[in-house]
């Protein structure tokens, strides 16, 4: 990604080329080739200017964030009960007001640039958003948005404070009490949900950006370490397609001789997205008495989703659910490292695991294992005097052999005789890709019924989202198998 200085330097280069074209043509009309070059440079200049504007706003937002105290409030306060979450700085310059965006007579690229600029501004203004969440959201927009600004538009719709209020009222069954701004925000979100759904029957509420644990809550220090360290991408369809290659091929060639065929091989890994779902029943009494139902629902959704993913990202089958990192590596012979002694985990296995990973992947390598396995490693140090743990304390993650070590409770912690025991993964976790299909949706079920068909005095919230995962370059990771 180019820096601001590089972008501004490119503007100067383009201007110089444009002047050169003008001077070379003099008083005569451009040739077709010159006109084509002129048009290409003009288009590039416009895009660079938009990139400069977007980057400048981003850096200004970071600078403002550095000058204010760190946010410690919950991001999911109930805006119905808590007036502190009322619309900030609405009116003139309101980034959420998409009626101010001219969608006609402009290219997709121009509209997308404006939507991204508005989304970056919205990220700065979101009620009670922590600086870390703002940074996560900004990076998503910079890395994954398309020319049309599809992701930026979703951020604007889902982060609108009017929609946060409407969502909270919807959970309480108070949709009759929406004001004009809230009704408009709800319609925009409903249109977006239908566009994202696999069917046309979507009737749920898009979870507000401040509550969506798919991308935001997990960045605050999730108990699911795989999501923390893996490569995360935004998928805009049911299947994510990537491009991978191990390295660029080079050769030594003699002077004035034909270059050898150094073509590298590209692959196109694909990852299917699967639906994860949860259901939350709540009595009408609790719903009426709970002061902050929005916060409660957001917390329950995040915890349940975290538990679901913690197992899937380790041992998921890849059929009907994401493929776990252990499942993927165990299927590749070259990615498995067997223990030196049957049914025994010894200090030598740890070093063998490290050495089995090619050097180019070790620069960003990290460990993941069950807490029980790490405790075994600590006892290696006691009996064998090996300085295995460079830092042992409350700070997370600790370092093992100089590499970050993360606790993954879904991995094997007990070594069973005469069986495969995949106790530790080591590698560059950019090779394990998690594809998040934005965003999470909650549907309200106004009445739940008992076995006899009579109402139970409960309401339900059905939540669902889509996610996929798989190892895209198995050669960049290794799994230790105690056989």
Image: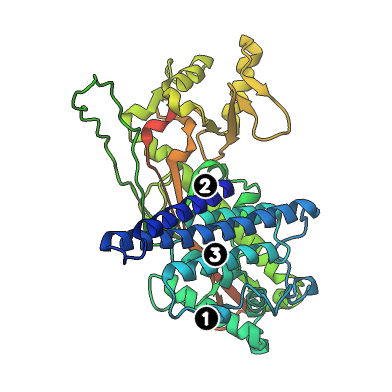
Local crowd size for mark 1, using a 10 Å CA cut-off: few (<14), some (14–19), many (≥20): few
Mark 1 to mark 3 CA distance (whole Å): 52 Å
- Towards the viewer: 284 or 292: 292
358 versus 312 height, above or below: above
Residue 55, image quadrant: bottom right
Q: Quadrant of residue 258?
A: top left
Residue drawn at x 74%, y 72% as measured from the top left:
88
Q: Which residue is mark 3?
A: 116
Q: Secondary structure at mark 2?
A: loop
Residue 60 position, x and y percent, is 68, 56
Apparent side of residue 306 relative to residue 421 in the rendered image (left or right): right
Numbered disc in front, either 1 or 3: 3
Q: Residues within 10 Å of mark 3 (few under 14, many from 20)?
A: many
The Cα atoms of the two marked residues, 3 and 2, are separated by 17 Å
Q: Is there any visible trace of residue 210 in the rendered image?
A: no
Residue 125 left/right relative to 15: right
Task: First in sequence, mark 3 or 2: give its number.
Answer: 2
Residue 341, compared with residue 139, is above or below; it is above
Judge left or right: residue 425 versus residue 391.
left
Crowding around mark 2 (Cα neighbors within 10 Å: few <14, some 14 to 19, many 20+) is: few
Q: Secondary structure at mark 3?
A: helix
Question: Mark 1 = which residue?
Answer: 452
Q: Residue at the left extreme?
A: 258
Give the residue at mark 2.
Answer: 2
């Amino acid at each position: 990604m180019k820096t601001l200085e590089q972008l501004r330097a490119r503007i100067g280069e383009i201007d110089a080329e444009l002047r050169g074209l003008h001077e070379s043509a003099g008083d005569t009309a451009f040739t077709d080739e010159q006109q084509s070059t002129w048009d290409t440079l003009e288009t590039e200049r416009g895009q660079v200017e938009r990139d400069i504007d977007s980057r400048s706003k981003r850096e200004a937002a970071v600078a403002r964030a550095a000058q204010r105290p760190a946010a410690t409030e919950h991001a999911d306060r109930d805006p119905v009960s808590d007036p502190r979450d009322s619309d900030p700085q609405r009116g003139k310059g309101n980034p959420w007001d998409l009626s101010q965006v001219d969608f006609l007579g402009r290219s997709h690229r121009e509209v997308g640039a404006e939507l991204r600029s508005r989304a970056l501004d919205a990220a700065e203004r979101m009620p009670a958003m922590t600086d870390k969440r703002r940074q996560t959201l900004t990076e998503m927009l910079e890395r994954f948005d398309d020319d049309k600004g599809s992701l930026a538009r979703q951020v604007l719709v889902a982060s609108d404070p009017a929609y946060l209020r409407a969502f909270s009222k919807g959970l309480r069954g108070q949709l009759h009490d929406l004001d004009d701004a809230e009704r408009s925000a709800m319609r925009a979100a409903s249109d977006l949900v239908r566009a994202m759904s696999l069917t046309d029957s979507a009737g749920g509420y898009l979870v507000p950006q401040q509550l969506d644990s798919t991308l935001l809550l997990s960045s605050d220090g999730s108990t699911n370490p795989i999501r923390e360290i893996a490569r995360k991408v935004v998928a805009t369809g049911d299947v994510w397609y990537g491009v991978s290659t191990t390295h660029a091929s080079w050769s030594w060639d003699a002077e004035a001789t034909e270059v050898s065929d150094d073509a590298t091989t590209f692959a196109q890994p694909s990852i299917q997205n699967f639906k994860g779902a949860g259901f939350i029943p709540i009595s009408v009494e609790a719903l009426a008495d709970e002061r902050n139902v929005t916060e409660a629902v957001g917390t329950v959704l995040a915890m349940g989703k975290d538990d679901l993913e913690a197992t899937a990202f380790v041992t998921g089958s890849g059929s009907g659910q994401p493929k776990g990192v252990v499942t993927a590596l165990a299927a590749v012979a070259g990615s498995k490292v067997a223990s030196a002694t049957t049914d025994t985990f010894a200090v030598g296995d740890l070093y063998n695991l490290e050495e089995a990973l090619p050097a180019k992947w070790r620069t960003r390598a990290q460990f993941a294992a069950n807490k029980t396995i790490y405790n075994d490693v600590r006892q290696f140090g006691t009996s064998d005097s090996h300085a295995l743990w460079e830092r042992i304390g409350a700070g997370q993650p600790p370092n093992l052999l100089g590499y970050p070590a993360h606790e993954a409770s879904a991995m094997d912690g007990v070594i069973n005789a005469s069986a495969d025991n995949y106790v530790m993964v080591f590698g560059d976790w950019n090779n394990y890709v998690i594809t998040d299909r934005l965003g999470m949706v909650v549907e309200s079920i106004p009445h739940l019924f008992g076995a006899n068909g009579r109402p139970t005095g409960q309401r339900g919230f059905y939540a669902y989202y889509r996610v996929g995962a798989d190892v895209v370059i198995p050669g960049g990771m290794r799994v230790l198998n105690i056989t």
